Image (spheres, coloured by chain):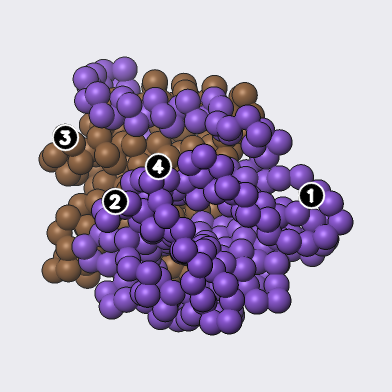
């Protein structure tokens, strides 16, 4: 029998062997490409200033960012405001904010949601959850991704749809009205946002897929055990 | 295209992230390039690994600590193998758990240590995260970007494979 103590000892020894087999970090010199330096500068700058926009500063606790070539989502914790529950849409120059207005109940949402239909070849790839907000990524064998996100109003979050060039049209997801954002560049992701019927949960799908397929995915969303 | 959770919200964590970046980016590139043999892909992997580090910054120890170095190497190795698997597309998907990662030379006499080092990278990473770094299965799921059930299965498969290897050495 392999005990946990044996495993801990072996893991420590194995780890030491791996580190001994690698060069010392200070000896690893690499002239990184300007492209890499730019990307990392962006990550570090965002670390220094987690919330770029001044009017979002109140919401610096949790920042969830999904950058999809040209379109991105950012969700941030926001203070509960007002005495009613609703997701309020606000249009800015180059992004749209969906902000939850209301007092959060004490109980955290425990229901999980997932699409029951996806275009052929897509499988679950990644799941990130924090405080009731969840982002699920599905990929196909070509590396194309569908991102599905939901956030309960109880989390008092804001969802941001960001793109340099997008057009919005109203569509229907079942009986619910939804906002479909079409990116001007067909290579970039489109975004569909709607509120769950009778609930305070905001849903969002982002993918490089045509409107009708995204609506079909949205209509298949169901609570899962 | 990238996806990440960013939770760097204190000055200490931001400073820690920048120290990690300066300390380990060269080593991370070395590890990624050893697996991918492609400099541009290796840089992409280093970038993705840093996003994962940022996402789990509160789980990261002192930047100079050897344990932190191991954690960073595990993440970049995992990301490199992910990319390698995607590059190979369908025919290799079934074999993705079998891919070797960073190679190591062990001259000690502990058979179990030797077996851990013989594990495919995916399994070795889980064993090291669980039994050297001390993370729970839930934390391993977050670090490796897996669902909890996928991480539990991977953890079990890793232990089963380790047991098989150990048995083959006549130790059980």
Horizontal placement of B113 versus A194: left or right?
Answer: left
Q: Are marks 1 and 2 in contact (CB under 8 Å)?
A: no
Q: Disc 2 designates what residue?
A: A185
Q: Sequence-wise, which precedes: disc 1 or disc 4?
A: 1
- Residues A94 and A45: in front is A94
SS under mark 3: helix
Q: Disc 4 designates what residue?
A: A164
According to the rendering, which colour does chain B have? brown
Q: CA distance from mark 1 to mark 3?
A: 47 Å
Q: Are marks 2 and 4 on the same chain?
A: yes
The mark closer to the camera, 3 or 2, is 2
The mark closer to the camera, 1 or 4, is 4
Q: CA distance from mark 2 to mark 4?
A: 10 Å
The mark closer to the camera, 1 or 3, is 1
Residue B156 horizontal/vertical position (percent): 43, 68
The mark closer to the camera, 3 or 4, is 4
Q: What's the mark number on residue A80?
A: 1
Horizontal placement of B68 versus B61: left or right?
Answer: left
- Residues A140 and B110: in front is A140
Q: Are marks 3 and 2 on the same chain?
A: no
């Amino acid at each position: 029998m392999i005990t946990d103590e044996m495993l801990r000892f072996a893991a420590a020894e194995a780890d030491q062997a791996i580190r001994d087999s690698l060069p010392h970090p200070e000896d690893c010199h690499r002239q990184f490409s300007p492209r890499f330096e730019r990307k990392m500068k962006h990550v570090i700058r965002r670390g220094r200033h987690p919330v770029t926009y001044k009017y979002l500063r109140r919401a610096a606790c949790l920042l969830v960012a999904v950058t999809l070539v040209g379109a991105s989502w950012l969700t941030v914790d926001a203070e509960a405001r007002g005495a009613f529950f609703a997701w309020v849409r606000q249009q800015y120059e180059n992004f749209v904010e969906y902000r939850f207005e209301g007092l959060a109940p004490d109980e955290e949402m425990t229901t999980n949601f997932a699409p029951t239909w996806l275009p052929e070849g897509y499988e679950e790839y990644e799941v990130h959850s924090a405080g009731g907000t969840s982002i699920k990524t599905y990929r196909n064998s070509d590396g194309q991704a569908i991102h599905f996100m939901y956030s309960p109003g109880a989390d008092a979050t804001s969802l941001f749809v960001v793109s340099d060039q997008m057009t919005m049209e109203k569509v229907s997801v079942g009986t619910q009205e939804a906002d479909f954002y079409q990116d001007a560049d067909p290579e970039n992701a489109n975004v569909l946002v709607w509120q769950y019927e009778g609930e305070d949960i905001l849903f969002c799908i982002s993918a490089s897929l045509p409107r009708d397929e995204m609506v079909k995915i949205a209509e298949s969303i169901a609570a899962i055990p | 295209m990238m996806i990440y959770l960013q939770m760097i919200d204190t000055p200490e964590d931001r400073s820690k992230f920048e120290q990690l970046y300066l300390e380990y980016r060269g080593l991370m590139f070395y590890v990624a390039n050893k697996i991918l043999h492609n400099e541009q892909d290796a840089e992409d992997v280093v970038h993705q690994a840093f996003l994962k580090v940022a996402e789990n910054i509160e789980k990261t120890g002192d930047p100079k600590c050897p344990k932190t170095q191991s954690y960073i190497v595990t993440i970049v190795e995992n990301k490199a193998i992910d990319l390698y698997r995607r590059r190979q597309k369908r025919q290799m998907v079934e074999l993705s758990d079998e891919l070797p990662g960073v190679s190591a030379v062990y001259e000690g006499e502990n058979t179990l240590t030797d077996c851990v080092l013989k594990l495919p990278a995916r399994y070795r990473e889980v064993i090291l995260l669980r039994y050297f770094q001390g993370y729970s299965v839930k934390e391993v799921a977050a670090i490796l970007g897996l669902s909890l059930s996928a991480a539990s299965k991977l953890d079990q498969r890793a232990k089963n494979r380790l047991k098989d290897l150990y048995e083959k050495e006549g130790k059980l």
